[in-house]
Image (cartoon, rainbow, N blue to C red):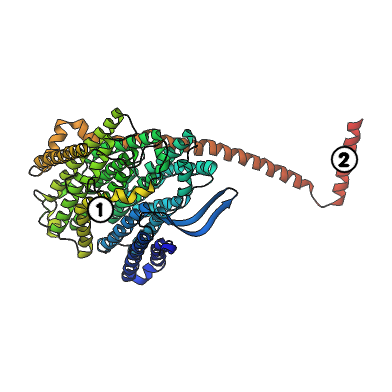
Amino acid sequence: MLNTLWLIPILPFAGFLLNGLFGKRLGKGFVTAVALLASLGAAVAGTIAVVQYHAAYPTGGLHLNLVYNWIASGSIGADISFQLDPLSVVMLMVVTWVGFLIHLYSVGYMAHEDGYGRYFAYLNLFLAEMLVLILGSSYLLMFVGWEGVGLCSYLLIGFYYQTDYAPAAGKKAFIVNRIGDFGFLVAMFLMFAYFGSVDFAKVSSIAAAGGVEHWLLTAICLLLFLGAVGKSAQIPLYVWLPDAMAGPTPVSALIHAATMVTAGVYMVVRSNALFRLAPGAMMVVALIGALTALFAATIGIRQWDIKKVLAYSTVSQLGFMFIGVGVGAFTAGIFHLITHAFFKACLFLGSGSVIHAMSGEQDMRKMGGLKSKIPITYWTFAIATYAIAGFPPFAGFFSKDEILASALNNPYFPKPFSWLIWSLGTVAAFCTAYYMYRLVYLTFFGNFRGTHEQEHHLHESPASMTIPLIILAALSAVGGALLGWPHHHFLAAWLKPIFPEIGGAPEAQYEISPNIEYALMLVSSAIAVIGWWIARTRFRDRGLEADDQFARNMPAVARGMENKWYVDEAYGATIVRPLEGLSQFLWRGIDALIDGTLAIVGYIVAAIGDLLRFFQTGNVRNYALMFFLGVIVFIWVLA
């Protein structure tokens, strides 16, 4: 497999073609078999490649599989080639196996939906494009996968195209992401212009060798980060992700929790040699991540749609990942990416199981008392909630604690800035514990608040949905301890080879004093416990009454949170509507003027043609007369 890495993305791409071309005619059985075999085949092929890679490169290294010389123009070039190194190995395992579990879950969740074949065709295509993104050996090939997953996101968000809201959400995601993608493109143009290549290895070696101007490195890093801000939903381009919940719930789990939205984090870590030489850009990354983590967490406190709470939670957790990579703790950022894939995929799939049991209902105000009705869903959801809230020894505790500890004790920034980032992250962690337990208590505890018909149809999900939940819950429980136990950090040792030594730049992995780390662990645990205790006190027995009381006591704050701090409205007033007005003016004013002017010119030309045609009679005597008159006029002019 090492010399045929291209086969890994080809397998799900073949599934896309088969289901897209023949799925509707050959039925659901064919679609299911093709989709599951394609995703499982990619996971198995990826695992075989990883085993072979580890045997060939026991201490880590770079393995390239050249497929085709894509661009060769003078000193500028780019290849279609795929690579395996410790970072792509980690991403490959997460994307393929979590992707397969979500494919399996979708079989039960989408069983009665129209467009079953179309759904799985899109899902297979997404997996193929995501694999191109993480296995590509250059920024250009990464960009191909980057745009491919953007297209699949648009298709899957707008899956329910008969509605008004789904196509609108798909267009919003597509348009907002174009802003970030523009930054990515310009960054590649700068690499071509100054480095002559966009291959990861060449760009990193040129940067690490020194001699590259600081302004150029900073510009490239900020432009790359602009791409990450769009794809990974950070301030100010995060607004597309909450609306993306219009797609089917498994889509939310796969694209908007476990894989696609983490592409920006992966890209920053892949570019660590550039970022370590541009500390100003790293400060921007860390600050944007911290602000996003806190801002999105405050919105999640007052949402009622179960998927919207998880959507803002995703935005917030992505902010934590960017805190990690922004303070130079690249391993911590990837660590949280992995644990987040486990517990957030479990949470989204668990919410899908709740919605399935509730006959499509997503409003938590109409739920309650589901703990005994859907016990597997409840317990798996509870484990994933422990993980995201940061309770030891669950997965999120280790990764989130490492990010916050790194933010406070990093060699890149002055102490006041480090304290600011740590404080924002800590408050966001408290909000996370609070709103997640609010979700749990409103959904699974108290009395049932739905209709009698919904209560009559409450039932646990089928095995195709609960088995992925159980596996993801187990990973949410033990994944953090297995990968990143303090001072026995398997992931840190594994990823060490991807960080080149750079003279004059701090190390990409740095040690934190055990005393400081254990003290911060206690602080993180205390924050999680306080958030849980407040949510339990307010919502376990009182339910919606606690939120009503909050709305009465702090009406302006409650309205602001519930309306997402009016960001969408602000964008509508300052950007969307002015652009619409300008477009209307250009259409009805300038365009009409241009059309009118051209119409008049055309009319004049046509009239002149008609006049000249009057003289073209075909009669020789008329032409002789015209000639004679012309001679007379000529003589008269000369005289």
The residue mark sitting in front, 2 or 1, is 1
Across the whole image, how many numbered discs are drawn on residues?
Answer: 2
Where does residue 335 sit, x and y in percent of width and height? 28, 48
Residue at image position (17%, 48%) is 393
Q: Is residue 61 left or right of residue 609?
A: left
User: Is the residue under label 1 in contact with that under label 2 (CB below 8 Å)?
Assistant: no
Camera-side residue: 70 or 498?
A: 498
In the foreground, 337 or 115: 337
Quick one: SS at disc 2? Answer: helix
Question: In the image, residue 245 lies at what x, y percent?
Answer: 29, 49
As helix, strand or loop, the secondary structure at mark 1 comes to helix
Q: Position of residue 445 (x, y in %)?
A: 10, 49
Q: Nearer the viewer, residue 223 or 357?
A: 223
Is the residue marked by circle 2 packed among few (<14), some (14-19), or many (20+) residues within 10 Å?
Answer: few
Q: Is residue 352 above or below residue 419?
A: below
Q: Quadrant of residue 227?
A: top left
Q: Nearer the viewer, residue 195 or 174?
A: 195
User: Which residue is disc 1 drawn over?
Assistant: 342
The C terminus - image quarter: top right
- Of pointers 2 and 1, the one earlier in the residue sequence: 1
Any part of residue 337 in sight? no
Specify whether residue 400 is in view. yes
Q: Which mark is residue 207?
A: none
Q: Is residue 259 left or right of residue 481?
A: right
Identify which amino acid the numbered label 2 is placed on.
Leu
The image quadrant of residue 608 is top right
Is 480 situated left or right of 613 in this image?
left
Residue 89: image x %, image y %? 35, 55
Which residue is tagged 2?
Answer: 629
